[in-house]
Image: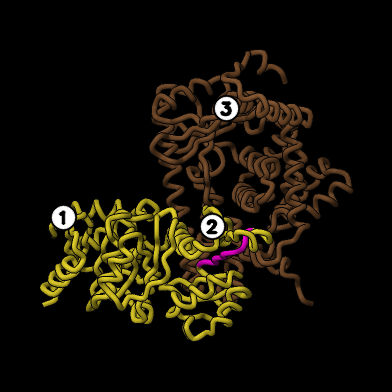
Chain colours: A brown, B yellow
Amino acid sequence: MIKSPAHHARTLLINAVRFPETLPQLTITDWNLLLRIARSKRLLGRLYADLEQLKLLETIPPAAAAQLQAAHNLVQHRHTVLTWELNRILWALNELNVPIIALKGTAYIIAKLPPAAGRFFADLDILVPIARIAEVEQKLTEKGWLKTQLNPYDDRYYRLWMHEIPPLRHRERESEIDIHHALLPRTSYYGTKLDTLALFNESYAINESRVYVLSPHDMVLHALVHLLLEGDPKEGLRLRDLIDIADLICCFESNSDFWENLIRRAQQFQLGRLLYYGLRYSQHLFAIKIPPSVLKFVAQSAPNTVILWLMDWLMPLALLPEHPDHPQRIAALARWLLYLRAHWLRMPPLLLIRHLSYKSWLRIRGIRQHIEIKPQDLKQL
Amino acid sequence: MNVSDLTLIELRQRLATTGLCFGCGLFRIRLHTPVASIATLLHDLYAHYPVYSEQGIDDYRIKLDWTSWSRRWIRPIVRFTADSPAPFTDIPIARALPTLEWGTNWCIATRAHHLLMLHAAVVERHGRGLILPALPGYGKSTLCAALTHSHWRLFSDEFGLVNPEDSMLIPIPRLISLKNQSIDVIRAFAPSAHLGPSFHGTHKGTVAHVRPPFNSIARMNEPAKPYWIIFPRWQANAPLTLEPIPKDRAFMLLATNAFNYEVLGELAFGAVSTIVKNCDSYSLVYSDLQQAVRTIDELVCSAHD
């Protein structure tokens, strides 16, 4: 049976991630295609890390090894940059004595967790309690970080509705830092239940420094939130985010209480549906082993059959790569639909309409110089 | 087989279908373009590059395509892309070649992080490499073009590629891009130099390209050990001066000149240290190209004996 180009491209990448030991057997033509796809999915560094660990870099074509090496060097540099930026943030906030949780990539790097290997992380994300965020922002701007210049409406919108403040950037270094006070926007369907204080209570410190990371179960849930609720219309859902989840689960499953805690937290934060999807597609695409009792539990949060059938069809289409020479309309549609879904869950439609119409009204009548955030605004939800 | 062994029709066909796969230094580039006038220029300027078979691992997949059906016929404009969109504005067809060249440089600069990339021209003679690091406008390309047509082998006029493992210089003999007055200076200096047409009104003024001599492409897989570093600077009416630079200063100058010193970190530190240790470093201020080339020749001959 002749497989379609799309099928071939998908299989090539998934097999490369799941079975890196088979990479030395690829033909030159497949290598050429794999490098293109892996580049577009930002997985070149990952392939390097896997092959290096297996000591197989010498056995692949030198031209492929060179591209992987280049990606690896870039990733290593990124890790150095992020670690240093975090170091500077801790230095700047030293006097404040505020608890800080490093999120996502930065957390994986400092906690030396498997998803860090070969992974390029763009920004640095930290979480601080909402009550302290003004102080933190103030202190950082005093110590050399600059605020993003936004017009007053956007700035207000950010602060009022989002789970983070507009990004800061150090005046000499280029890394952008995102300072969160929650893992999801206040507007999000799931956002109100995801309690930041609870996250702090179960976080743990790294190397006796002042920086914390989320507990294993919260880290997995955050990765799920990131995968399923923060899409990009063009890229769709990010395969590397699903790989992060699969990596974290494989790493944590040996902790005796990991699954139990994961279920407890998913219940507490009402993230059962997201957990259901996350486990389902990690299992479908990466054959992650999940205890039957856990599967049985999360099945309670499964959507109805029609939705499930739709998701089973959309998710692989949106997550997996296309053949770069044979793009499919249907895959673009899947990516767009899932983006729409993520956006829907992040922001109630009425608020979205209000936001968009206000934006267009502003464009018509010009921008107001300053918009005050009143304390009652913050209590609207 | 080289590009010149293809007929213009064959070249056009390849460019418009599977893409022209050719070698430039250690890179394999696949170039797609349906634009016929580009094919004519490349047939001449890319003549010596070896054509590779369709099967292979492409380092860069480059495309120069019409932006839209209508803009193909009315005031035609083209767009440069490389796998994914690249940060270049669409350009009128008449200035497509300079953009193709800058675009390819951009690809190398943003991706070739397995190598240390110096912002330098590099030439070689008797197996010894000469690095000419300089800021834009310091006459690096002009000096490089002149040396390339005076017994030196061209490695690059833009990218001093260094293998960070052994600090050897790696050739990447791309077209030498000359700007404004340099074009006539090189025409006068080296009548044998093969120049392409002049492109007026680019963001760098008038630009013309020198085709790398056959020899520099035929030997593009032979690296060389660096022996000299000369920081050139062209200055109108300045008397020629050639002054040695102490190693500590040479190190700082070379490290800050590299495109990706920070990215390679310790590897880059090691490579730059080795180069500076093994090289004599000079700063060269000149206004007369003949005199500058002669001075460099004398310096090299005295070292060679």
Viewport quadrant of the C terminus of chain B? bottom left
Q: Nearer the viewer, residue B273 or B27?
A: B27
Magenta stretch: includes residue B33? no
Query: How many residues crowd mark 2 within 10 Å: few (<14), some (14–19), many (20+)?
Result: some
Q: Which residue is mark 2?
A: B91
Most common secondary structure along the magenta stretch: strand
Residue type beneath disc 2: Ile
Is there any visible trace of residue B153 in the rendered image?
yes
Residue type beneath disc 1: Ala
Q: Position of residue A129 (x, y in %)?
A: 56, 24
Q: Is residue A166 above or below residue A280?
A: above
Q: Secondary structure at mark 3?
A: loop
Query: How many residues crowd mark 1 within 10 Å: few (<14), some (14–19), many (20+)?
Result: few
Q: Secondary structure at mark 2?
A: strand
Q: Which residues are magenta?
A: B60-67
Marks 3 and 2 close (CB-CB < 8 Å): no
Q: Is residue B177 above or below residue B11?
A: above
Q: Which residue is mark 1?
A: B238
Q: Which mark is residue A151?
A: 3
Disc nearer the start of the sequence (2/1)? 2
